[in-house]
Amino acid sequence: MNIISQSQRVFEQMRMQRNRRGAMIVFIAAMITVFMIAVVFTVDVAYMQLVKTEVRIAADASVKAGVENLLRTEDKSKAETTAKRILSLNKVAGKTMAFNNNDIIFGKVVAGTNGNWAFQANQTPYNSMKVTLRLDGQANSSVPLFFARYLSNNNYTPTHTSIAANVIHEIVLCIDRSHSMCFDLSGADWSYPGSISYPAGYITPPHHGNSRWAYLDHAIRAFVTKIQHRNIEPDIGLITWGSDTTLGWAWWPHSGRKFQAVTVELPLGKQIDNVNGKIQAHYSDIMMGSTNMAAGLDAAIDMLTDSSTNSLAYKTIILMSDGMWNTGRDPILSAQDAAAADITIHTVSFVSVDNQSAMTNIAATTGGKSYSATNQAQLKDAFEELAGSLPIVLID
């Protein structure tokens, strides 16, 4: 009896060991399955991320090249050809890419009231492109995954849209250099810095430290510095203006000297590094003339509409004056001409408030901003804000 009981116990122990081994095999098989699923997702997810990055890089490179060509040649078909060529050089998943029909769109980017930029399809003048790269089984085949296809038979079909706007900006600084720019900041006519008084002040160059021209000089320097730190340098022109003036015999030693209403200090181009020098050069000579504002604006408009300028560029005039126009035609008429040519005029009124209404109307006529500065700090702030508001390259 004891022998039988012992045998039963041995048999029962062997059966339990076999059950444990069977359970372990099931557990190991389950773990291997989980592990394989993890491998499937890890490999395929990493590959999908790689392909997604390649799609984005190819689309971005294509649209950047297309916009560069568009703004250089002003030719839509050439820009589209360039975008397609650059796309073909950037492979995705080892394959050459192409665009589907209607996946290249030209348009215009405009500034919104919230400070963001919006792409407007098919709006002219074109300054931007929108491209969409699709791996949807049409122009480009979808991407087969390594393992997931065995589970669900699904391929990867990424899509990426890129928008680029390389905004060329042409700016003319249109600066009042009438004789009142030699005055101090008191607001009184014929009041000069220091011990200078009329009539000696009339034939004395502007004071280096406390004349209105000196304060303008500081503001322009701040403007130049901010432009120089931007990624894209705009084309800059500089015009100074007063009025046609001839000095009489009493103004020795300048008797008989003639001063033109408008001087083109710098033609439109990559001139930002030369602006300060041209402004500071006026410390060495007298300033003559009244305030023929329209003459300065008309010259600036002519500069921006010359046949050599880029028709796709944003065109801007920054008009600065310390007084009310008192000769020449009404500058509002010049502003209307600017608006018709799609030129924006920003105005900066310095010291005098008499001209604020006219300057505000000039800016409003062209969709520009109007600033009123009564001291050096406000004048500097106005020019710095204008420099900081210029459009630059956008990628979305």
Image (tube, helix red, strand yellow):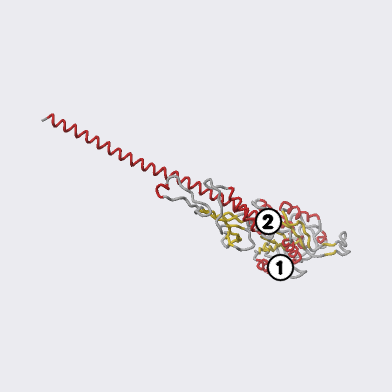
Mark 2: few/some/many CA within 10 Å (<14, 14-19, 20+): some
The residue under the point 43% across, 44% down is 42
For this rendering, which residue is in front, 242 or 31?
31
> Gap between marks 1 and 2, in whole Å?
27 Å
Q: Disc 2 marks which amino acid?
A: Thr
Q: Disc 1 marks which amino acid?
A: Asp
Q: Quadrant of residue 125?
A: bottom right
* Residue 307 picture location, percent across and down: 74, 61
Quarter in which the N terminus is drawn: top left
Q: Which residue is mark 2?
A: 73
> Of discs 1 and 2, which sits in the foreground?
2
Mark 1: few/some/many CA within 10 Å (<14, 14-19, 20+): some
Helix, strand or loop under label 1: helix
The residue under the point 56% across, 48% down is 96
Q: Quadrant of residue 176?
A: bottom right
* Visible residue check, residue 221: yes
Q: Which residue is mark 1?
A: 337
